Image (tube, grey):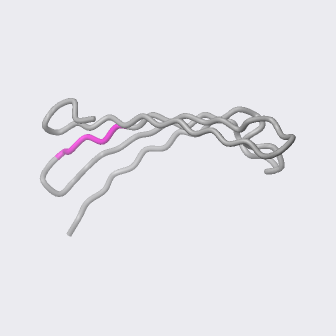
Amino acid sequence: MPVATNLVLSVGYAQSKQDGAKAERGWSVAAAYALSKRTTAYAGFFDANAAAVNGRAGAPDSRFGIGLKHTF
C-alpha cells in the first residue's frame, strides 16, 4: 500500500495445516522507502507460531531484516 510518493508498506499473513498437525501461522510487515530514483532502503519483520518452525533446529520464531537496493 503506498503511503507517500516514496514510501510503500506491505503486510502479509499465511496459514497452513496438514492432517493431524497444528496449524502453522505467520505474519509479516515491511516498508520500502525510495531514497532516490534508483536507490531504495527497506526493512521487514516476520513472526511465526512455534508450530511453523518445529523441526527446523535452531530456527527463530521471528526475524528482522534491513537492506539497501541500488539499480545500475
- Residue furthest right as drawn: 20
Is 53 a magenta residue? no
Asked whether 25 or 19 is in front, the reply is: 19
**Position of residue 23 in the picture relative to residue 68 (left or right):** right
Task: Name which residue lies at 67% across and 42% down.
Answer: 16
Which portion, as a residue range, is magenta? Answer: 31-35
Q: The C terminus lies in which quarter of the figure? A: bottom left
Q: Is residue 32 magenta?
A: yes
Residue located 21% across and 53% down the image: 39
Q: Can you give x and y, in whole percent of width and height, for residue 23 in the image? A: 74, 35
- 32 relative position to 14: left or right: left
Q: Residue 44: horizontal and vertical position, in percent?
A: 45, 39
Q: Is residue 31 left or right of residue 2?
A: right
The secondary structure that dominates the magenta segment is strand
Residue nearest the observer in this picture, 11 or 38: 11
- The quadrant holding residue 21 is top right
